[in-house]
Image (cartoon, rainbow, N blue to C red):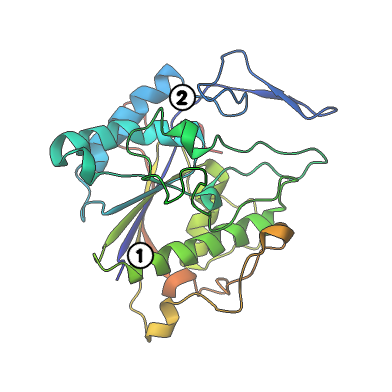
């Protein structure tokens, strides 16, 4: 069964702005995907990603599975690491799986929030992105997708918990027996992942509990489970894409945590970055 989950945030990125009246996004630096709200890393963020890669190459246990938010900045953050792995293991032995459920948080709005580029576009930039699905015209189905009208903070927590519960169950059922999972995500999502894994939700949503600096690194170790059922996904909780704003509650609060619960051993470490902690959200 899965034993360790590593979580990292993307590096320092380029910026964008949104007109609150029209919902139009724009940026001074063109995005590689053509989506203004999907920026690449700034040159400084690229250096951070290279330093993160060096750190990830020496984690114990080594990474078995890699999942990423499908926004460009997250996939670009993983690129130095996956390139190094491919050079060591061979191109066919490295892949990154994109998952909408661990994507960005935009809050609530009356206009549509941004969506990432389709995998067919992202694969032209990132050679290790998950292999093509059986039907070339159809991307793999995500576990859960945020509503285009945004989310409340409780919905965000439940979205991450729901997604994680399925990722963990999928890894536990994998016949190759992966022991560790790496997730690359965004600031708010990184905080919520920590809460969903440990099952600890503070009384104040804005409490500074789980750190999320650019290219920071966290490590969660699985608790000893009392029964196999503790690791499963609640069968009654099924997300319906036609009612995307209705996020199932998988019962992670009150210290339970998803997948039987996890302990945080490393919280937002930045000691391997030349300038340490920066841009905490």
Q: Secondary structure at mark 1?
A: helix
Residue 109 vertical placement versus 1 (above, below): above
Residue 73's x, y, as percent? 47, 31
SS at mark 2? loop
Can see residue 204? no
Residue highlighted by disc 2: 41
Characterize the local packing of mark 2: few (<14), some (14-19) or many (20 or more) Cα atoms within 10 angstroms: many
Q: Residues within 10 Å of mark 1 (few under 14, many from 20)?
A: many
For the C terminus, the image quarter is top right
* Vertical arrangement, residue 218 with respect to residue 127, above or below: below
Mark-to-mark CA distance, 2 and 1: 30 Å
Q: Where, quadrant-wise, is the N terminus in this rendering?
A: bottom left
Q: Position of residue 53 (x, y in %)?
A: 28, 35
Circle number at residue 54: none
Left or right: where does residue 120 sit relative to residue 227?
A: right
Q: Residue furthest top?
A: 28
What residue did someone put label 1 on?
171
Question: Residue 11, relative to residue 61: is it above or below?
Answer: above
Give the number of callouts: 2
Q: Nearer the viewer, residue 269 or 23?
A: 23
Q: Are marks 2 and 1 in contact (CB under 8 Å)?
A: no
Q: Return the x and y of residue 179 as percentages of the image width and height.
A: 26, 63
| Nearer-the-camera pick, 154 or 68 | 68
């Amino acid at each position: 069964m899965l034993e360790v989950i590593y979580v990292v945030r993307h590096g320092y990125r380029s910026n964008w702005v949104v007109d609150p009246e029209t919902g139009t996004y724009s940026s001074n630096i063109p995005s590689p995907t053509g989506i203004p709200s999907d920026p690449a890393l700034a040159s400084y963020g690229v250096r951070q990603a290279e330093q993160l890669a060096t750190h990830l190459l020496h984690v114990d246990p080594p990474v078995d599975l890699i999942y990423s938010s499908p926004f460009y900045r997250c996939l670009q953050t993983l690129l130095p690491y996956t390139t190094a792995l491919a050079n060591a293991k061979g191109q066919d032995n490295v892949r990154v799986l994109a998952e909408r459920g661990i994507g960005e948080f935009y809050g609530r709005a009356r206009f549509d929030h941004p969506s990432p580029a389709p995998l067919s576009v992202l694969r032209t930039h990132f050679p290790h992105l998950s292999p093509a699905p059986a039907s070339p015209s159809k991307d793999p189905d995500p576990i859960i997708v945020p509503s285009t009208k945004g989310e409340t903070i409780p919905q965000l927590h439940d979205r991450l918990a729901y997604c994680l519960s399925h990722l963990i169950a999928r890894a536990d059922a994998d016949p190759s027996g992966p022991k560790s999972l790496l997730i690359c995500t965004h600031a708010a999502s990184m905080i919520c992942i920590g809460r969903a894994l440990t099952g600890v939700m503070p009384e104040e949503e804005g409490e500074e509990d789980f750190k999320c600096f650019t290219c920071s690194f966290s490590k969660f170790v699985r608790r000893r489970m009392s029964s196999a059922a503790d690791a499963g996904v609640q069968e009654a909780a099924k997300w319906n894409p036609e009612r995307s704003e209705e996020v199932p509650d998988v019962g992670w609060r009150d210290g339970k945590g998803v997948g039987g619960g996890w302990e945080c051993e490393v919280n937002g470490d930045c000691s391997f970055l030349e300038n340490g902690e920066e841009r905490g959200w």
